[in-house]
Image (tube, helix red, strand yellow):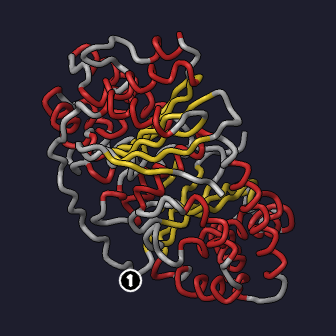
Amino acid sequence: MINYSRFSLDNGLRVLLHEDKSTPLVALNILYDVGSRDEDPGMTGLAHLFEHLMYGGSVNIPEYDMPLQMVGGENNAFTNNDITNYYLTVPLENIETGFWLESDRMLGLDFSQKNLDTQKNVVIEEFNQRYLNQPYGDAILKLRPLAYKVHPYRWPTIGMDIAHIENTDLEQVKKFFFSHYAPNNAILSITGNITYDLAFNLTRKWFGPIEKRKVQFRSLPVEPAQKEEKTLTIEKDVPSTALYKVWHTGLRNSMDFYTLDLITDLLAGGESGRLYTKLVREKKLFSEINAYITSDIDPGLIIVQGKLMKNIDIRHAEEAVNEVIKGLQNRNGIKDEMEKVKNKFESSTVFSNTSILNKAVNLSFYELLGNPDLINQEVDAYRNVTQEMVIEATMSYFVPSNCSTLYYKSTRKDK
């Protein structure tokens, strides 16, 4: 059981605290309720760009990393469709440095042309390396707009087009910052060897003076239900042909989330998963194959992707994938498999939550979802999935009309 306390500041900052005396460290996690879904379709990639800009110095501190490293701290960040998340760990005796640094960059960044140009170049290089110059790197750039037509999940976190980042100017950057990076649009979680009184006093000291901001109102278009199968074929000089299939799911808070999460574990639970066992080891149709749920706050996707063995017909491989998924509707053997993946989920979750950093990240995200006690409830929610629920979800979601498929064909000739 992970116990926690909650309080809020007058400026709207929500704070969660978990005290753990088993460590000399303290973790700070600050989640901003802004991700790529909050971007304008004509100017995507800003949320990810800000992940980089936030390390480029503030109005008071030229460099974020150096002061933290000097007191034995570490930090990192990530951005996804829904959130931007910054975290650090530092020894208790130096925890005020963490509060100082995080509050200062919330207060105001160094909005200089030099800093913007530097970070734009970093992001553009990342875009090129990961998405344009990497085999299969552009698959997600093709797959998302195939699956989504109106919702902003139709572009990846890094952006829809590299030109959007190239053309970003200082005014657009400032407007995005002051519309999203605010105490009333953030959640701070503090975990580790720190008392409630010290956490409260430091939070009030460093974050309390930051004023509320007018946060951009979120009004996202609702993705209509997909009513017919969609396909796209591309041909590239890649090592082997690949298959990508996606099915729409519900909200992160929907009743079916844990059922669908368990289904992906049944399909791709390592080398014992059904896809690997049937299609890699036994039939030798794929060299590798995986399945996962995107876990987006708004209706997301289940993704199955795999690379085919040489000379395997992609339609034949696709039919084999569909057969494995359909096999989940057969009661024979599924109960034992479900118990195995439930045990694995429980052990990995419990182990993960021994880390003060993981607890801090999870508390912030579950608070955003509306229920921080999910940190204590998720294992039970996963364990409560029944065989009937798996069969019903398989029949409801894994249907052709709900599926989008990318055939990524290799044009490479044998030498």
Q: Nearer the viewer, residue 287 or 175?
A: 175
Say if residue 128 shows up in the picture: yes
Q: Which of 236 and 4 is in front in this view?
A: 4
Residue 72's image quarter? top right
Quarter of the rendering occupied by the C terminus: top right
Is the residue marked by circle 1 packed among few (<14), some (14-19), or many (20+) residues within 10 Å? few
Write the residue at 70% across / 58% down.
Answer: 289
Residue 298's image quarter? bottom left
Residue 409 pos. (x, y %) = 57, 55
Question: In the displayed structure, does residue 193 sit left or right of residue 278?
Answer: left
Residue 318 pos. (x, y %) = 64, 71
Task: Look at the picture and state if 284 lies above or below 39.
Answer: below
Across the whole image, how many numbered discs are drawn on residues? 1
Q: Disc 1 on helix, strand or loop?
A: loop
Quarter of the rendering occupied by the N terminus: bottom right
Task: Look at the picture and state if 245 lies above or below 181.
Answer: below
Say if residue 310 shows up in the picture: no
Write the residue at 67% across / 78% down.
Answer: 384
Task: Look at the picture and state if 362 lies above or below 102.
Answer: below
Write the residue at 38% across / 13% down.
Answer: 63
Write the residue at 74% across / 59% down.
Answer: 286
Question: In the displayed structure, does residue 224 sit left or right of residue 401?
Answer: left
Task: Look at the picture and state if 169 lies above or below 354.
Answer: above
Question: In the displayed structure, does residue 8 sit left or right of residue 371?
Answer: left
Residue 4 pos. (x, y %) = 53, 51
- Indicate the amino acid at tag 1: Lys
Residue 258's image quarter? bottom right
Which residue is farthest front?
197
Residue 365 pos. (x, y %) = 46, 52
The residue tagged 1 is 227
